[in-house]
Amino acid sequence: MIIKKYLGQILADMGFITTQQLDEALQRQKQIMKEKASPERLQRDKLVTEARLAIDTDTAPLLGHILNDMGVVTKRQLEQALQEQDKTFQAYMSLENEKFGIAVEIGALVNSTFSLAEVLHLIMTHANRVTNSVASTLMLVDETTGELVFSVPTGPKEDKLIDIRIPSGEGIAGWVVEHEKPALVTNVKEDARFYPKVDEISGFETKSMLCVPLKAKTKLIGVLEVINKVDGTFFTKEDELLLSMFGYQAAVAIENARLYGELKDQLKESKRAKDALRESEEKTRALLNAINDIALLLDTDGTVLDSNAIALQRLGKSADELVGKCIYDFFPPPLAEPTKNAVSEVTRTGKPFRMEFEQESRIYDSHVYPICDAQGKVIQVGVISSDITERRSMEAQLRQTHKMEAIGTLAGGIAHDFNNILGIILGNTELAMDDVPEWNPARLNLEEIRIAGIRARDVVRQLL
């Protein structure tokens, strides 16, 4: 929030003078003004000086001269302070002009071809902006029950506020409806009218609030409220005037369009669509969490948009630690580079990409898929990585089994043939021994051949 500041205050803020020196200079200024001014002007300037408000063009330089004569500021410091004062004033005027421009824009929106829901949302967005508030809400009165229904909420918890109802007469908003006049509350916790259940539902903490009635001609149809200043200050009467103007424009939009019932239908349809989308997202997440594969949703630059439970478990990170960070930062260099290349390739070609990698003695089969917009442009990338370590191990075992079976078959065939050969050798050896006398040395050689043949036959039979 831009606040108008004056010369003495600016000099103090810049550290050129102390508060005590400023008080002394103001006292001297007051004395000089007493000596120069008429009784009527003296009374006016007394109030101005005591409140330390704006000093007119005649007295503003006087304060600078007094401080200079006191020796507490130099002319250079005075020039710097005056320049800062001018900047502050220009910024303040720029903000005032911006507010005026927004008011003109809102007037044009009311008569535009935009849908009523769009116009009201824009009005509330601008109300946030000009009042420097964190959140805002347009609530409509349910004519049947008298309840106030959150119809156009904006801010960090807007998705949780749609269609929330406040009982008739409850809360600060209910008071505004009953009395048909604004309510400016600096601390809702100290206001007995405050309705805390909305904060409990949304998880938002309301600190201060400004609420104005919404009237279509003479009929009160709802309220507009803004909540919590961004800078932590309080809402002002100026904010109340601006919000009342927005309330008038919103009421005119509703009255001109004669779409009060249609607005409800649109908002209900929007809620149904949001509910359907939320349900679809929940089902998709449940499905992804049910599989035993790593699932990641990435931006085209590798930023993690979402992940399933297995991905968090394998990476050893929480969702807060992973989402919004670059996935390559969580991988070792040998894996980060090929993953980055795969994402770039899919983004460039729009075609799926498959890669296999090993990490911490585990083998992964990774598929990278493009996610395109309506024009076919790749805007996101999906990654599914399956742990195939056990599958690879089983495949290796199966190959070894097949190999051993082949070796066994081959060995069996060879053993059968070798057994036939041994049969011939043993048979002929025994025939030869019958023809050789026992005293003949050759008989000993034939006996060794027969014994070796019998051993070989036993070995071959083990292979069969």
Image: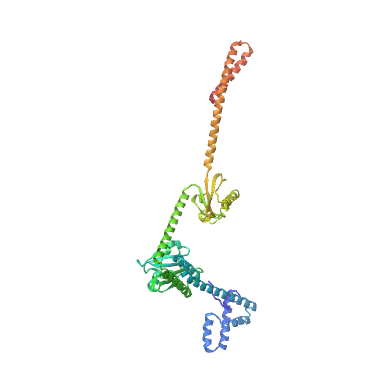
Quick one: 273 or 86, which is closer to the camera? 273
Relative vertical location of residue 448 with respect to residue 187 in this rendering, above or below:
above
* Residue 445 percent across, percent down from the top left: 62, 16
Rendering coords of residue 60 (x, y %): 58, 81
x, y percent for residue 374 = 51, 56
Q: Quadrant of residue 137?
A: bottom left
What residue sits 46% from the left and 50% below the top? Answer: 287
The reply, left or right, for residue 203 in relation to residue 67 is left
User: How is this picture coloured?
Assistant: rainbow
The foreground one among 216 and 152 is 216
Q: Quadrant of residue 184?
A: bottom left
Q: Is residue 193 left or right of residue 59?
A: left
Vertical placement of 268 versus 84: above or below?
Answer: above
Residue at x 52%, y 88% (from the top left corner) = 40
Left or right of 138? Residue 352 is right
Using the rendered view, name the quadrant where residue 278 is placed.
Answer: bottom left
The single residue placed furthest to the bottom in the displayed view is 38
Residue 210, image x, y percentages: 45, 71
